[in-house]
Image (cartoon, grey):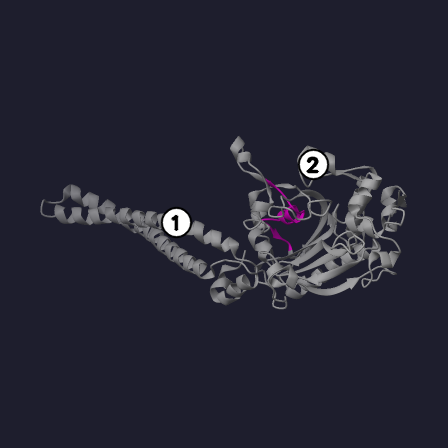
Amino acid sequence: MIDLKELRENPDRFRNGVRDKCMDVDIDRLLALDEARRAVLMRQENARAEQNRIGKESGARMGQLKGKLKSASDAEKPQLERELAELEAKPTALKAQVHECEVEMAQIEPQWKALWMQVPQPPAQDVPKGKGSDDNVEVRRWAPPGFDFAKTFAENRGFTPRTHLELVKMHGLVDFERGVKMAGTRHYVMCGLGMRLHQAVLRYAVDFMADQRGFSPMGVPVIVKEECMIGTGFFPAGREQAYHIEESARGSGHDLFLTGTGEVGLMGIHADEIVPAESLPLKYCTVSTCFRREAGAAGKDTAGLYRIHQFDKVEQVVVCRADEQESRAWHAQMIQSVETILQSLGLAYRLLQCCTGDLGVKNEDMIDIESWMPGRGELGRDGAPTGAFGETHSASRLGDFQCRRLNLRYKDETGKLRFAYALNNTVIASPRVLIPILEMHQQADGSIRVPEVLRPYMGGIAQIG
């Protein structure tokens, strides 16, 4: 969520942010509701303060008046009774004012909060403007030795590539039919060496982050309360993508949601906490099963392992001081970690600077990493796919947006409470990353060379098939 004080002082920053992210949030309406809410709060507080003052001051006076009435003459009684009635009427009138304010607040606050929660984090100033993914800007690309992006896979390797769908069927690595039988479309069963390769990728990524990058591995819930989804910025905008467990309908106190990324659990660890400044930065990683409804993706990448409802992901988050340069430095380190992993796996890739229209609600900056997948893309003259990039990673800077929603703070060197800054990054997501691994390491006979870094996790197996 955004800082309301900053919104009041610099509304144009947020108007521009909404425009640049191609979103529809009425900032002027929010400002009007905010002003009305503050006015009601002030009236309410003044009325309550007056109630307290009168309660203290009039109690003794009312006692005196009641005492005087007992011995007052008939001529004195009317005046005493009027004064007593006035004193007794004031608390009633103030109570009515407080109630009126409560009624007004009940009408204003839900609208105010709903709008406030929709305001996106404004993009960083150096993020290129654009309407969507087509306007993202390529930063750089890398390919393993001997692979030239200017040539087709067949020209690079001397044979026409098989798609990952053909390869997994050939070697019995994935069973789509039985997955669909059990759970419906976009589900699958990992089999034999397919499951071992899947686990090898995840274990390698966790060990890399823990042993070479010093991140603390954590096991976090993948079923969370709504507050956790709101706090991490996945609600309200992403509600249609989450699987909803309606526990309240069965008598439980709250509903639950399946998370689409380990980021939710990792960031939720310190919600509503003041963490010691000396403990920053917090560096966590997790491997977790992720669930996404893929609402709105009908007919898109329906076959294969690219767009599925359930997958496993190694995620990393960093919670650091409220310092832009420190945040940018961590962002660069996150990206460097992913590049090191992809290069060690022998996968070709490119980095894309996401434009403003492709950032989403919570990000102020985001770099996507797309791996080259020979089995994607348009069909060539020979009837084989010409290859295309597919997103496999995403690294984001969020400023204080997420920590503000989670109420995650620390005390700076002056003792002032500050909302921390947060970053997150996909270290590896499988089985999607198996697509480029299988397709890039396939041999002319259809066998697949296992990348050397994964072989220790595969019991020394160097080749599939």
| 3D distance between C-alphas at marks 2 and 1 | 47 Å
Taking depth in this image into account, of 217 and 343 the one nearest to the observer is: 343
The residue indicated by pointer 2 is 180
Q: Residue at x 54, y 49 (%)?
A: 236
In the shown orientation, is residue 362 left or right of residue 68? right
Q: Residue at x 62, y 46 (%)?
A: 298
Q: Residue at x 44, y 51 (%)?
A: 111
Magenta-drawn stretch contains 272: yes
Farthest residue toward the top?
Answer: 250
The residue indicated by pointer 1 is 107
Image location of residue 83, percent across then percent down: 19, 49
Q: Which residues are magenta?
A: 257-276
Label located before the other in sequence (2 or 1) = 1
The label shown at residue 404 is: none
Q: Can residue 101 be seen from the camera position used here?
A: yes
Magenta-drawn stretch contains 396: no
